[in-house]
Protein backbone atom coordinates (compact mmCIF):
# COMPACT_ATOMS: atom_id res chain seq x y z
CA UNK A 1 0.00 0.00 0.00
CA UNK A 2 2.80 2.37 0.90
CA UNK A 3 4.57 1.45 -2.33
CA UNK A 4 1.48 2.25 -4.40
CA UNK A 5 1.07 5.55 -2.62
CA UNK A 6 4.74 6.43 -3.27
CA UNK A 7 4.29 5.45 -6.92
CA UNK A 8 1.24 7.73 -7.22
CA UNK A 9 3.06 10.62 -5.56
CA UNK A 10 6.11 10.11 -7.81
CA UNK A 11 3.84 10.11 -10.86
CA UNK A 12 2.21 13.33 -9.67
CA UNK A 13 5.63 14.90 -9.25
CA UNK A 14 6.69 13.77 -12.75
CA UNK A 15 3.62 15.19 -14.48
CA UNK A 16 3.34 18.33 -12.33
CA UNK A 17 5.00 20.51 -15.02
CA UNK A 18 2.94 19.01 -17.84
CA UNK A 19 -0.38 18.88 -16.07
CA UNK A 20 -0.71 22.33 -14.55
CA UNK A 21 -4.07 23.79 -15.35
CA UNK A 22 -7.25 24.62 -13.45
CA UNK A 23 -8.57 21.06 -13.77
CA UNK A 24 -5.30 19.65 -12.40
CA UNK A 25 -5.36 22.05 -9.46
CA UNK A 26 -9.00 21.08 -8.75
CA UNK A 27 -8.29 17.33 -8.88
CA UNK A 28 -5.13 17.76 -6.82
CA UNK A 29 -6.85 19.82 -4.14
CA UNK A 30 -9.96 17.63 -3.98
CA UNK A 31 -8.54 14.14 -4.31
CA UNK A 32 -4.82 13.70 -4.68
CA UNK A 33 -3.51 16.02 -1.93
CA UNK A 34 -5.92 14.50 0.66
CA UNK A 35 -4.91 11.06 -0.59
CA UNK A 36 -1.29 11.82 0.26
CA UNK A 37 -2.07 12.87 3.83
CA UNK A 38 -4.65 10.10 4.26
CA UNK A 39 -2.08 7.60 3.02
CA UNK A 40 0.45 8.77 5.60
CA UNK A 41 -2.13 8.62 8.40
CA UNK A 42 -3.28 5.21 7.21
CA UNK A 43 0.29 3.88 7.21
CA UNK A 44 0.83 5.21 10.74
CA UNK A 45 -2.47 3.69 11.84
CA UNK A 46 -1.58 0.33 10.31
CA UNK A 47 1.82 0.32 12.03
CA UNK A 48 0.14 1.16 15.34
CA UNK A 49 -2.48 -1.53 14.78
CA UNK A 50 0.25 -4.04 13.95
CA UNK A 51 2.05 -3.13 17.17
CA UNK A 52 -1.17 -3.52 19.17
CA UNK A 53 -1.84 -6.89 17.52
CA UNK A 54 1.66 -8.10 18.41
CA UNK A 55 1.16 -6.94 22.00
CA UNK A 56 -2.24 -8.67 22.10
CA UNK A 57 -0.64 -11.85 20.74
CA UNK A 58 2.02 -11.75 23.48
CA UNK A 59 -0.67 -11.21 26.13
CA UNK A 60 -2.67 -14.10 24.69
CA UNK A 61 0.36 -16.39 24.79
CA UNK A 62 0.99 -15.35 28.40
CA UNK A 63 -2.67 -15.98 29.26
CA UNK A 64 -2.50 -19.44 27.66
CA UNK A 65 0.67 -20.23 29.59
CA UNK A 66 -0.92 -19.06 32.83
CA UNK A 67 -4.02 -21.12 32.06
CA UNK A 68 -1.85 -24.26 31.85
CA UNK A 69 -0.17 -23.40 35.16
CA UNK A 70 -3.56 -22.77 36.76
CA UNK A 71 -4.86 -26.10 35.48
CA UNK A 72 -1.83 -27.88 36.95
CA UNK A 73 -2.27 -26.13 40.30
CA UNK A 74 -5.99 -26.91 40.30
CA UNK A 75 -5.23 -30.59 39.74
CA UNK A 76 -2.84 -30.59 42.72
CA UNK A 77 -5.41 -28.80 44.89
CA UNK A 78 -8.13 -31.27 43.88
CA UNK A 79 -5.86 -34.20 44.76
CA UNK A 80 -5.01 -32.67 48.16
CA UNK A 81 -8.71 -32.01 48.74
CA UNK A 82 -9.52 -35.68 48.05
CA UNK A 83 -6.84 -36.72 50.54
CA UNK A 84 -8.20 -34.28 53.12
CA UNK A 85 -11.74 -35.60 52.60
CA UNK A 86 -10.50 -39.16 53.07
CA UNK A 87 -8.69 -38.12 56.25
CA UNK A 88 -11.85 -36.39 57.49
CA UNK A 89 -13.90 -39.53 56.83
CA UNK A 90 -11.36 -41.55 58.83
CA UNK A 91 -11.39 -38.95 61.60
CA UNK A 92 -15.19 -39.08 61.86
CA UNK A 93 -15.03 -42.87 62.05
CA UNK A 94 -12.35 -42.70 64.77
CA UNK A 95 -14.40 -40.12 66.69
CA UNK A 96 -17.47 -42.37 66.55
CA UNK A 97 -15.38 -45.23 67.96
CA UNK A 98 -14.04 -42.94 70.69
CA UNK A 99 -17.57 -41.89 71.68
CA UNK A 100 -18.68 -45.54 71.80
CA UNK A 101 -15.69 -46.75 73.87
CA UNK A 102 -15.81 -43.70 76.14
CA UNK A 103 -19.50 -44.30 76.87
CA UNK A 104 -18.82 -48.00 77.47
CA UNK A 105 -15.95 -47.19 79.85
CA UNK A 106 -18.01 -44.62 81.77
CA UNK A 107 -20.86 -47.10 82.12
CA UNK A 108 -18.46 -49.45 83.95
CA UNK A 109 -17.33 -46.84 86.52
CA UNK A 110 -20.09 -47.70 89.04
CA UNK A 111 -19.22 -51.41 88.82
CA UNK A 112 -15.50 -50.63 89.27
CA UNK A 113 -16.24 -48.37 92.26
CA UNK A 114 -18.41 -51.07 93.76
CA UNK A 115 -15.64 -53.67 93.33
CA UNK A 116 -13.06 -51.28 94.84
CA UNK A 117 -15.40 -50.71 97.76
CA UNK A 118 -15.76 -54.50 98.33
CA UNK A 119 -12.03 -54.96 98.07
CA UNK A 120 -11.42 -52.21 100.62
CA UNK A 121 -13.95 -53.69 103.04
CA UNK A 122 -12.46 -57.17 102.62
CA UNK A 123 -8.99 -55.84 103.46
CA UNK A 124 -10.14 -54.26 106.74
Image (cartoon, grey):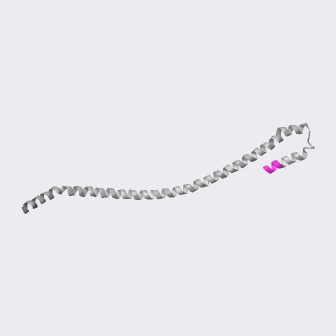
Q: Position of residue 111 (x, y in %)?
A: 14, 57
The segment highlighted magenta reads 1-6
Q: In this view, does 27 lie to the left or right of 53?
A: right
Q: Position of residue 82 (x, y in %)?
A: 42, 58
Q: Quadrant of residue 122?
A: bottom left
Q: Position of residue 112 (x, y in %)?
A: 15, 59
Q: Residue at x 58, y 53 (%)?
A: 63
Q: Which residue is drawn at 27% across and 57% down?
A: 98
Q: Residue at x 81, y 48 (%)?
A: 5
Main secondary structure along the magenta-highlighted residues: helix
Q: Which residue is drawn at 87% across and 47% down?
A: 11
Q: Does the magenta-highlighted stretch encompass residue 69?
A: no
Quadrant occupied by the C terminus: bottom left
Look at the picture and state if 67 lies above or below 15: below
Q: Quadrant of residue 62?
A: bottom right
Q: Position of residue 53 (x, y in %)?
A: 67, 50
The outermost residue toward the front is 124
Q: Does the magenta-highlighted stretch encompass residue 5?
A: yes
Q: In this view, does 71 lie to the left or right of 92?
A: right
Amino acid sequence: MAQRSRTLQALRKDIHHVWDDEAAREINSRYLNPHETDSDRMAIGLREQNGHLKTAEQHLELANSLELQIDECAAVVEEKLRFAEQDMDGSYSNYDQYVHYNAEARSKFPVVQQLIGRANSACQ
